[in-house]
Image (tube, rainbow, N blue to C red):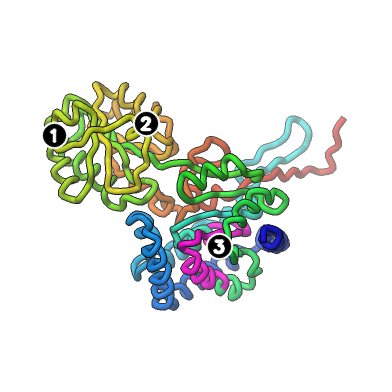
Amino acid sequence: MTKDIAQIMHEIGARAQAARLTMASATAAQKDTALREAARHLRGQAAALIDINAADIARANEQQFSAALIDRLTLNASRIEAMAKSLEDIAALPDPVGKTLSQWEGHNNGLHIERIAVPLGVIGIIYESRPNVTSDAAGLCIKSGNCAILRAGTESHATSTAIWHSIEHGLQVAGLPLDAVIIVPTTDRQAVGVMLTMNDSIDVLIPRGGASLTKRVAAESRVPTLLHLDGNCHTYIHTAADPAMAIEVALNAKMRRTGVCGATESIVIDEAVVDHILPKLADRLLGMGCVIRGDARAQMADDRIERAHDHDWSTEYLDAIISIKTVKDISQAILHINHYGSHHTDAIISADKNAVALFCKQVDSAIVMANSSTQFADGGEFGMGAEIGIATGRLHARGPVGCEQLTTYKYVVTSHGATRR
């Protein structure tokens, strides 16, 4: 069986590589047509897509998956419309391919040097329960002139395949190769293991899933990766925070959707305001069904708060659970966040401009926010149309990975017959 899966995967890789040069030279008009036609087809298939998704949800319920996973898996009319709208938003962006990033004259040698944006090539995306990743990843890869190999999770495979058919339709209408976006046809987990070794046909791998998947990719992949391990995000309530703002922003950051990677998992709060703000915030959180775990000082402020243990500070709950850490000042807050956070997204609530500036400078995260909900950690909200994921590493891309982040560059050098001495 392993041999059969390996053969399937290597054939897919070869097909994607064969489509690579065509996609790299595709016109902006072709790529935008593909995206808009895919969006139109997706809207037309909404009712059928919801039925297919309902079967995926039923299977997930039978296997007793968590409420957070079921939420990530679920499609409805508004979420399908959001996927279609994202494809149109990506189409409306400037074409990142062929863009001159910089240019200059060589050192007294008659050379004119340009640095030009070019596609990365073939991008493998391994994801689990989010079927919208299918359209987001495909759309961003098409716009950036890349080819994509999509490996959807078992729980979302039927839904993701149905979405992929809309992408195929768009590519066909635009006259682009159907192999520009290929979905892995099997749910066998051996396919993931093979993808991790396909450095001859996949240029970059992007995992979009839980910590176990991402850790496996980081440990085993022979292909360069863009990844983040966890979304252990913090909202820090500073002494100078407006109490009403702090409560509303923290509530949204945690409870809007608890299963997304930008959800706040821990609130850090200055001791000077804990007695004034925390009980009111706890009222709202508990009223929405959120379990609150806190340190001893937080429990003194509100006896409804459960005791937090050391592991809580580094836990990505992806559920209606939050931890509360009290600190003496902003320096302690920054130390705590940098130590326990996952360098994904962290926010400060404060009216003190100096405190905001210090936090934004010293918190070592891909996204740092001021007086804003961490749930805005999303490429679509950043005006990027969509995102494949949020990278927390330091090389190539950091933060939301959109179509510009899916390009690299090459140097184009011209002269009038220059020769080197």
In this rendering, would 320 be left or right of 28? left
- Residue that numbered label 3 is attached to: 187
Q: Nearer the viewer, residue 37 or 259?
A: 259
- What's the amino acid at mark 1? Asp
Marks 1, 2: nearer the viewer: 1
Q: Locate residue 417 relative to residue 99 in the image: left or right.
A: right
Does label 1 or label 2 sit earlier along the sequence? 1
The disc label shown at residue 277, or none: none
**Cβ–Cβ below 8 Å for labels 3 and 1?**
no
Tag 2: residue type? Cys
- Quarter containing the C terminus: top right
Callout 3 amino acid:
Thr
**Going 58% across and 39% down the picture, which residue do you hit?**
219
Q: Position of residue 13 (x, y in %)?
A: 69, 59
User: Which mark identifies residue 360?
Assistant: 2
Mark 1 in CB contact with mark 2 (< 8 angstroms): no
102 or 237, which is in the foreground? 237
Instruction: Report, in whole angstroms, how far the alpha carbon at label 2 lies from the one at label 3.
Output: 42 Å
Q: Position of residue 24 (x, y in %)?
A: 67, 58
Q: Which residue is under mark 1?
A: 302
Q: How many residues crowd mark 2 within 10 Å: few (<14), some (14–19), many (20+)?
A: some
> Could you say where residue 299 lies in the image, as x and y percent from the top left?
17, 31
Q: Which residues are magenta?
A: 139-168
